[in-house]
Amino acid sequence: MSESTIIWVHGDNLNPHSAPFQTAPDAPAIFVWDDALLEEWRISLKRIVFIYECLLELPIIIRRGDVAEEVVQFAREHEARRILTSESPSPRHQFLCQTIIKHMPKGSRLEVLREPAFVDGAEKVDLKRFSRYWNAVKKQAMR
Amino acid sequence: MSRDMRRDFASREELVAYLQQEFPQAAQRSPHVSETRGGRRAAEARLRAARYGTEYERTRNHLDGQVSRLSPYIRYGVLGLNEVREYALSHAQRRFEAEKFVNELGWRDYFQRVYRELGDDIWEDVEDYKTGFPAHSYRQELPEDIRQGQTGVRFIDDAIRELIETGYLHNHQRMWLAAYVVHWRRVCWQAGARWFLEHLLDGDPASNNLSWQWVASTFSTKPYYYNLENVLQFSGDRYRGTPQNFGHEAFVGTYEQIARRLFPNITLSDEHHEPRKGRR
Ligand SMILES: Cc1cc2nc3c(=O)[nH]c(=O)nc-3n(C[C@H](O)[C@H](O)[C@H](O)COP(=O)(O)OP(=O)(O)OC[C@H]3O[C@@H](n4cnc5c(N)ncnc54)[C@H](O)[C@@H]3O)c2cc1C
């Protein structure tokens, strides 16, 4: 029997075909509005409306509050020990991942899934200036 | 037990009314709602409507040019960078004609990679300012006349109004506005970047902060600045006429003259007076 899984959707990947949705198409999914973040960054209503319209086209539950707490609670409601989420470069996302896993029952897993890269091998490129990056990857980017 | 937020709305007006009620502080700060709609369906419609080949390359620097306006969808991953690239390459008349567009997607990928390396240091100056002024001589707070769009400089105030009402600005307007804030008003780029993130639908710490730093010269070899001629060239007929009538005096002059006014402590070499070609 497959273990119970939930998907945690966040603002860096609101694609209905994202890796988590492809990996577990039937898993219950949640998005949580980060109340603290919205206030800290004074996010305007028009951004909230835009994001909400994106959310309405996803098969998810929408909640608000403390993100980590809400995700852990959602997992508990579904007796899930496995959480899938999309990769993000944001340090806050990494912090939330750590907080969530700390509050999940022992043996739980949080899997951060990556989308296919725009270009491969760019890890070795010196990122000091765009031109260096582009010269190194242009051929691949245009394939 | 947590409370689920609503998903059933008969109309956009109903959705907006609900969100005004749920997020009253945000609505109070700025009540505007953009005409740009969120969601995968709207994103795919934009993808189909956009131009990717020579027409894009030829017109993209102009405020009324054929830019895609895909940035908010790309920012939230509603459209993946790879699917946008594939669509562009296969919908330009010939694949190689989409190179300029794919190059712009490359900027996005590049900034995301730099962000992954920098983390929260994306808020620090990556390098020193190359303007002849030390970092501490830049104001920390965004002046109120800028926040309100009442600087008295017409093309700047128009851009600010557009930013606040629509959440979108053409790249050229972003560059002009950012350079105005940092170089003409000597405000630190961080204050401007935070303000942009309040309003831009595509607001993203990577593309936003690193572009501000590029303008400021803390993530480039020289400051970005411009003159009125450049503004007139790319904004259609909007500002033709006597500069004084538009409050545009501070932008009149050659690049050399402007540079001497803005950066009196340094001599920029001849090459620096050329309009920047690398990126718009
Ligand atoms: C001060 C300043 C702040 C900016 N802040 C942001 C921001 O918060 N979020 C953001 O996505 N872009 C930002 N940009 C970059 C750029 O202005 C926008 O991506 C672009 O104008 C979006 O319009 P478009 O979709 O019609 O672009 P198009 O010309 O159609 O380009 C296609 C796509 O390529 C990407 N792209 C294009 N130009 C750039 C660029 N210079 N840097 C990074 N990606 C690019 C975008 O995803 C864009 O949707 C900023 C630029 C400046 C100068």
Image (cartoon, helix red, strand yellow):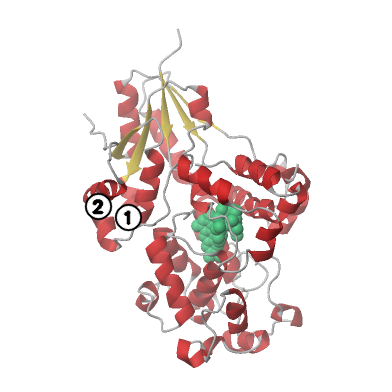
Residue B20, labelled with which disc?
A: 2
The amino acid on which the numbered mark 1 sits, given as a three-letter code, is Leu
* Residue B131 placement, left or right of B41: right
Q: Quadrant of residue A106?
A: top left
**Eyeballing the image, is A84 above or below B99?**
above
The amino acid on which the numbered mark 2 sits, given as a three-letter code, is Gln
Residue wearing tag 1: A45
Pick the quarter of the image with the N terminus of chain B.
top left
List x then y, in percent, for residue B196: 44, 63
List x then y, in percent, for residue A79: 33, 17
**Eyeballing the image, is B49 above or below B130?**
above
- CA gap between label 2 and label 1 equals 7 Å
The reply to whether the residue tagged 1 has its Cβ within 8 angstroms of ligand 1 is no
Are the residues under marks 2 and 1 on the same chain? no
Tags 2 and 1 touching, CB below 8 Å? yes
Q: SS class of the residue under badge 2?
A: helix
Displayed-image quarter of ligand 1: bottom right
Residue at the location (41% across, 34% down)? A58
Residue at the location (36% across, 55% down)? A46
Q: Is residue B279 visible?
A: no
Q: Quadrant of residue B130?
A: bottom right
Mark 1 Cα shell of 10 Å, populated few (<14), some (14-19), many (≥20): many
Q: Quadrant of residue A62?
A: top left
Mark 2 Cα shell of 10 Å, populated few (<14), some (14-19), many (≥20): some
Pick the quarter of the image with the C terminus of chain B.
bottom right
Q: Is residue A140 visible?
A: yes
**Eyeballing the image, is B63 above or below A52?**
below
List x then y, in percent, for residue B279: 66, 65
Instruction: Say which chain tag 1 marks.
Output: A
Q: SS class of the residue under badge 1?
A: helix
List x then y, in percent, for residue A51: 39, 46
